[in-house]
Image (cartoon, coloured by chain):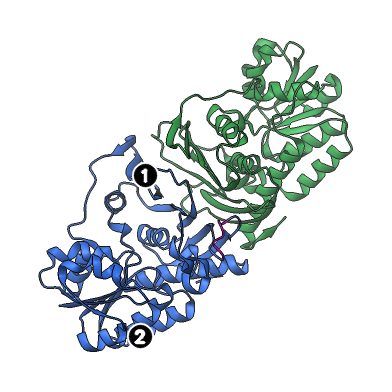
Chain colours: A green, B blue
Amino acid sequence: MKLCMIGARGHSYYVLKDLPVLNTVKLTAVASGDADPSNLLKRAEQWQPRAYADWREMLDREQPDILSVDGPFELHAAMCIEALKRNIHVFCEKPIALNLDDLAAIRKAYEGSSATIISMTAMRYEPAFYTAYQLMQTGRIGKVRLIQTRKSYKLGQRPDFYKKRSTYGGTIGWVGSHAVDWIQWFSGSKFATAMATQTTADNGDNGELEIAAQCLFTMKNGVLAQASIDFLRPANAPTHGDDRVRVVGSAGVVEVELGKVYLTDAEGFREITDLQQPERGFFEAFVGSIRGECAPPVSPDETFETTLACLKAQKAADERNIQEF
Amino acid sequence: MKLCMIGARGHSYYVLKDLPVLNTVKLTAVASGDADPSNLLKRAEQWQPRAYADWREMLDREQPDILSVDGPFELHAAMCIEALKRNIHVFCEKPIALNLDDLAAIRKAYEGSSATIISMTAMRYEPAFYTAYQLMQTGRIGKVRLIQTRKSYKLGQRPDFYKKRSTYGGTIGWVGSHAVDWIQWFSGSKFATAMATQTTADNGDNGELEIAAQCLFTMKNGVLAQASIDFLRPANAPTHGDDRVRVVGSAGVVEVELGKVYLTDAEGFREITDLQQPERGFFEAFVGSIRGECAPPVSPDETFETTLACLKAQKAADERNIQEF
């Protein structure tokens, strides 16, 4: 299988991480998607890919089977659509679209394509979250009732494209996609309603970038859920992100906090130290699913639903109303 | 000062706990407020109070200076109003009112009275929360931007009065008052908007009791806040409640989790083990404020505002809309 890559802004390192074990996948070419391709070329140099200035030309000439889309955020949708129209499987950085029109256009392209698409919501596969999911799946907390998630990032110095909605999309989608994906994943349900608050106040001269947001969701199966999203993690905190989930069931609670897993159930409260790893890497599992060897690590439907939920929550915050799905 | 007490359903043990150091306060009489006064009589027996079947008769005959109101929830408002009309200072279990009309009536009685009123939102004075507040107050986390709170209780076996709105009020007010009070306290602001979700599904045959609720608030000073409230704590968890707060500022984060305090700031992440205690007990500080010796542990305005925020959040969840303040 031939693989091409556009850009390396975000999670496309999952592709490069898994390439060494993917003997049937060959990285043939890269394009930056914007001005400077050096970042991706440098990261991928051991595979000696060809480099293109024009990503459309790359698709035409290379005719890849798989495309990694991780260039400018505002071009995700156009790149996904071009690839799907050419029946190229797409592994796209989250969020795949910055607005509802673009999302609808991607979905339409997907429905007319023989190819598949998933987003790089790979935090599902981090050991603590994966272990929490396995505990939930094996019935250790009973029926899921309530889900709380947290994504807290350090702000640091941000390139200018973070400062405008048109090139950034917004904090609920960019930071929050993982949190919203966990909600969908742990609840096993689609979204029913979204409410949200957000603020750009005191955002360190970062223009339209929302420094914090809070989202409430109800799920179609009755689960209540919440996502807390912010760029307020202190610069000297031990990790870039403080990523958490609390899944409350009828028979127990599983929590992920700072990379650790805690279970409260009929046996009391304790840390679960035996963390589990998925058999395959996130990109490896995507390739495996294309080859019919395994389920995808996240489905196209889940990819669309997470993107939709982020955009609806953002709309709720922008318009100060409640969004129905 | 003469003290009378009605009922012992909730936090009136704060009164009994502080009485031994309050030499100027004498507990003269108790009334149950409902059928069985034995609970309070037993708890208060060392002070040998008189017992009344009729709480109004107690007020008329005893003419107390202070009244502790901790009987049937649906009678809080009537008891507060009767006391305030008699210029008796009121120490009332939270929430002080189960609906907005009752709250308005209490406020009106307060405005026409020479007496004061506060609610028993005494979790402010628990060492971990009090220490977190001191850290915030001394500027350790900079300007407060985001507040998350959690109240999670074990459901256990509940008396029938929890099963009806008319006698229980609702979970956002009953469980959530502490969480909402923390939000007001740490933000130093009044509330601007409330949104909320709640559910009675799978509530263990507890009628109208909401098993879980999630609230979003914006504060008038721009702080975003959130309260997670549930009765889903497993029966074998080490404590009855899992009470948490996360206060995120421009220069740091202070968190209370399971009775411990954590600070993340320019010096990194660490537990703060030197927990601070208030100089006076919560009821002792209330008495002190009446005597002009100190500030009250919570003000009448804060008491009204916390009650209002709980009722507005409940209304938002009931009516599925956004409530403005």
Going from N to C along the chain, the mark reached first, 1 or 2, is: 2
Label 2 crowding class (10 Å Cα cut-off): few <14, some 14-19, many 20+? many
Q: Which residue is mark 1?
A: B258
Q: Which stretch appears magenta?
A: B203-207
Q: Amino acid at mark 2?
A: Ala
**Residue type at tag 1:** Leu
Task: Tell me the subunit letter for badge 1.
Answer: B
Residue B47 appears in which quarter of the rendering? bottom left
Marks 1 and 2 on same chain: yes
- Which type of secondary structure does the marked residue at label 2 adopt? helix
Relative to A293, is B38 on the left or the right? left
Q: Position of residue A137 (x, y in %)?
A: 62, 35
Q: Nearer the viewer, mark 1 or mark 2?
A: 1
**Spatial CA span between label 1 and label 2:** 39 Å
| Residue B241 to residue B102: above or below | above
Residue A55 on image: x %, y %: 77, 27
Q: Is residue A20 visible?
A: yes
Q: Chain of mark 2?
A: B
Q: Position of residue A266 (x, y in %)?
A: 48, 40
The total of numbered circles placed on residues is: 2
Residue annotated with mark 2: B109
Compared across the picture, whether A256 is left or right of A16 comes to left
Observer-nearest of B40 and B189: B40
Q: Residue B6's quadrant in the figure?
A: bottom left
Q: State the image coordinates of residue A234 (x, y, percent, origin top left).
A: 41, 39
Q: Which quarter of the image is occupied by the N terminus of chain B? A: bottom left
At 54% from the left and 52% from the top, the residue drawn is: A214
**Residue, x 80% and y 16% (percent of image)?**
A1
Q: Label 1's element?
A: loop
